[in-house]
Image: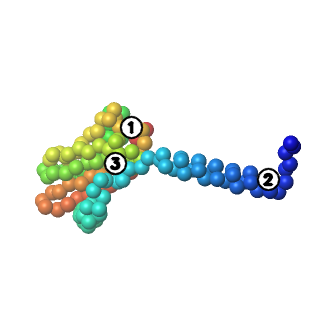
Amino acid sequence: MTFKWNWGTGIIFVYSGFVVFMLGMVYLCSRQHFDLVTPDYYEQELKFQEVIDGQKNEMLLGKPTTVVVSEEGVTVTLPMEGYDGEGMVTLYRPDNAKYDISLPLNGKSSVMIPMDKLKEGIYKVKASWQNEGKPFYNEQTLYVP
């Protein structure tokens, strides 16, 4: 028996190749890992007006929140002198939630995250605090080498 190459055979090979390609893509896509921004995403969306108000209040201070990367680590400094309120600094890693870091401010105007706790990649630095009953918020993108 000899193999004959004709239009029908070519069409069968093309369709078979397409099916194999699509099954491979479905398999690869099903193995893709993704994390939600936060487990309580919908609750956070309802509180988004507080974030907007916090950003406006932070802009009215005249100085921005600073994020400095050094060999020792990342230092986040609030633009307020003599800060005595409560707040939180979160380094959010968009591609993997297990690398997220949250540190309380506890009345300090700056916080340092040691470099050994950070992995190379992109982080979103989210600083939120309250002072004299007013919310403040700042968000910056940071690349850790």
Mark 3–mark 2 CB contact (< 8 Å): no
Q: Is residue 19 left or right of residue 67?
A: right
Q: Quadrant of the N terminus?
A: top right
Give the amino acid at mark 2: Thr
The dot on residue 9 is 2
Image location (x, y in percent) of residue 32: 47, 47
Q: Earlier in the sequence, mark 3 or mark 2?
A: 2
Question: Label 3: which residue?
Answer: 92
State the SS at label 2: helix
Image location (x, y in percent) of residue 145: 43, 38
Question: Label 1: which residue?
Answer: 119
Looking at the image, which is closer to me, 42 or 84?
42
Give the amino acid at mark 1: Lys
**Label 1 to label 2: alpha-carbon separation:** 52 Å
In the image, residue 96 above or below residue 62: above
Image location (x, y in percent) of residue 44: 27, 60
